[in-house]
Amino acid sequence: LWDDSLENSERMLWNAKVHPVVWMECSNNDAKDVALDLTSLKWISELKTSAGHGDALSEENQSSLELWRSLPRLSLSEIRNVADSYTERDFRDSHETAISEARCSQLKQIVAVMHGRKHTPTDFSFVANNFGSTRTVKSDVREALSCIDGIVLSALKDGHLDVAGRGFMLMGCLVRDLAETLVFSENDDTCGFNEMQWQKLISALRFSYHSDSAREKRMEAASSMFSLRDQMLQGEIGDGLFQFLATSFEQASFALTAVCVGSSNASLTSSRRRSSFENTDSNETGPSRSSPIPAGSWAVATAPARVDLSGGWSDTPPISYEYGGAVTGIAVRLDGKRPLSARCRVVPSSEGVVLRSEGRNLQTGTLQVGDADFCTLRRVSDLADFRDPRAKCALLKCALVYLGLVSLTQVHADNDEDLQPYINDFCQSSRSADVGLEVISTSLLPKGSGLGASSILGGCILAAIERCVGSDVIGLTTGDDNTVDAVLTLEQLLTTGGGWQDQVNGLVGGVKIGRSDQSIPLRTTIERIPIDPSMRSALDQRLLLAFSGQPRLAKNILVRVLRRWGQRTSEITKCVQDLVEGAKEAADAARASDIDRIGKCLGKYWELKKIMAGLESGVEPPVVAEVLKTLTRRKAIVGGSLCGAGGGGFMAVITSEGVDLDMIRNFVEITDDASFSWHRGSVDETGLSVLVEGPDGSEFDIGWHN
């Protein structure tokens, strides 16, 4: 590395001959098309990855090292002495110009992709990769953020809320990527971020899709968000600031998704629902009313769970209206029971609204200890946390707001108005006699089951309340599509997101394929697939469900998937295409009464789910992978998958012909995993149903679920 004449004390990296002189190869005698032969440097990469382990170089990299030794090599000091500094400066300047032009071209391409609603990757890595260790935001970052600002504001002006929503998601992804490049990771003090102000601006994006002033209000809110962001980025930056901004922009994207979903035809069929769901005051009269059931009687709505056979994720907004979705699934009973229900009754000579969310044992119906929420509503402000999925009885509160107990514009923490007049009107009670309202949701499934419980419960709650008070908001008697769209809108109101497949496959009986077109407003259609008695009997024998012992939370995986969809990575776009095709294949298999083919579709579907979430997301717990591997190796199943988004909950398998539940249990015992509990699945042809239980009936009856 050094000349022998150089004293040891003078030897340093500056004068070490480590830089080889390598060949330049020009294609077609074009000096601009230059390729460097870097074979002599390959050994360095292996040296770096194996540093400290004492591993010998591979044969290939040993040859690379020998080549490096044999080449003429220069030190940095020698390079400095032979370099033409003027030419070097011009060379670097030309590259800076070329890089700037390339960045500008890339941004223009992203603008065209966004406004053209193209399913093409929108990659800002060229910005994030250049960010590095700085504590200030450089011009290229500001340029990229300004580009997205323009996309969002232009889309809002044109009323293209889907494009604006994708723009907000892209901005969140860019800021999150910038945070990951920081060499310092301390969290900033988030107290100065004025979260309340940001939440007010995000809320303003939810104004009615059809309101005359909505466009201006949304543009004003977005502009204010961008100004706030720029102010926050003027000083020193850190991980905490970037994470806060990324989350805020993602929430803005979700808010616009909720508006797109809420603009569907089904969510506009009722003026009461329109005035409650959207941030607008309406002077229109409410929906038609029928007679409420007798005071003290329960309206009980029950429903099966669901198993998705293929296509899930394509039903999730915004994927479902930006690409179009298709999901094939089954309404199922577990051990002969429909595991989900809600009941509602008007309580005479009482006051307030009593809400309860309870979990009960699948076999006995006994209350599960610690698995219940309870709250009483007496003021309008008691409904203020209805958007927070972590709040007590949030789904029940959200359903009451959705059905028009109180208009959305009136629900806030500062409104201490007495709720009783609204309750009396909602329950069609005379003003001289106050009544109370009691609503209870019941699940016989463990939390985080992955069987669509929260969405299907949403349908049960809406149906029970509507039947009890004689409302006609969701139009239960007018078709399956209305109920499905109502629950989809309810979940957007609750901010849990999610798609339409849970309610399609749980609230609608039998085997069916649901579809949504690439369009706004979002429209879903449902095709029931008739199966003959012999096919149903065989399917009941071969469909098994197992609780993995690990609850799952779809929202964590959901946000992850929607980030990748916003960026339209090639992998996820191809995966969505395969999911839609897989749903069609599973539907064809059901029409052909081919249970083996259905099982194979289920197995392929599981592989696609893992791609959608990303393996690093924890979508496949090790114990699940081991059980599926064991059952497949023993040819006990033709296919299996975790239900829903994955990550835990229930697993569904289609057994091989002749393999029964006892055999499956014996095979799984080999894995020494006691957390799995196995259940028989059976097709439920009824779907959502509502009955009226007289005032002398019991508080709860497990028979309602049979």
Image (cartoon, grey):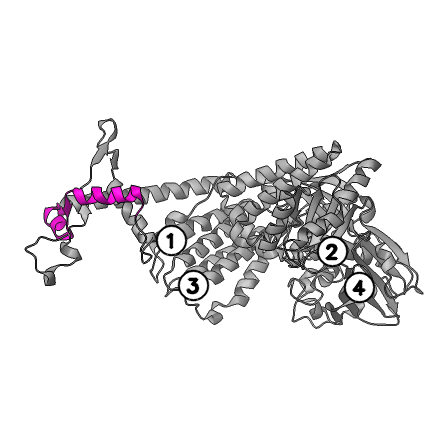
Q: Amino acid at mark 2?
A: Gly
Query: Residue beneath label 1, please?
Result: 141
Gap in Å between the C-alphas at discs 2 and 4?
12 Å
Query: Residue beneath label 4, please?
Result: 439
Nearer the N terminus, badge 2 or badge 4? 4
Magenta part of the chain: 57-85
Q: Are marks 1 and 3 in contact (CB under 8 Å)?
A: no
Q: Position of residue 477 (x, y in %)?
A: 83, 46
Residue 522 visible from this viewpoint? no
Q: Position of residue 6 (x, y in %)?
A: 7, 57
Foreground mark, 1 or 4, reads 4
- Any mark on residue 458, and which? 2
Query: Residue beneath label 3, please?
Result: 239
Q: Secondary structure at mark 1?
A: helix
Q: Amino acid at mark 4?
A: Val
Nearer to me, 656 or 510: 656
Tell me if residue 154 comes above or below residue 586 in the rendering. below
Residue 302 visible from this viewpoint? yes
Nearer the N terminus, badge 1 or badge 4? 1
Q: Amino acid at mark 1?
A: Val
Nearer the N terminus, badge 3 or badge 2? 3
Gap in Å between the C-alphas at discs 2 and 1?
43 Å
Nearer the N terminus, badge 4 or badge 3? 3
Q: Secondary structure at mark 2?
A: helix
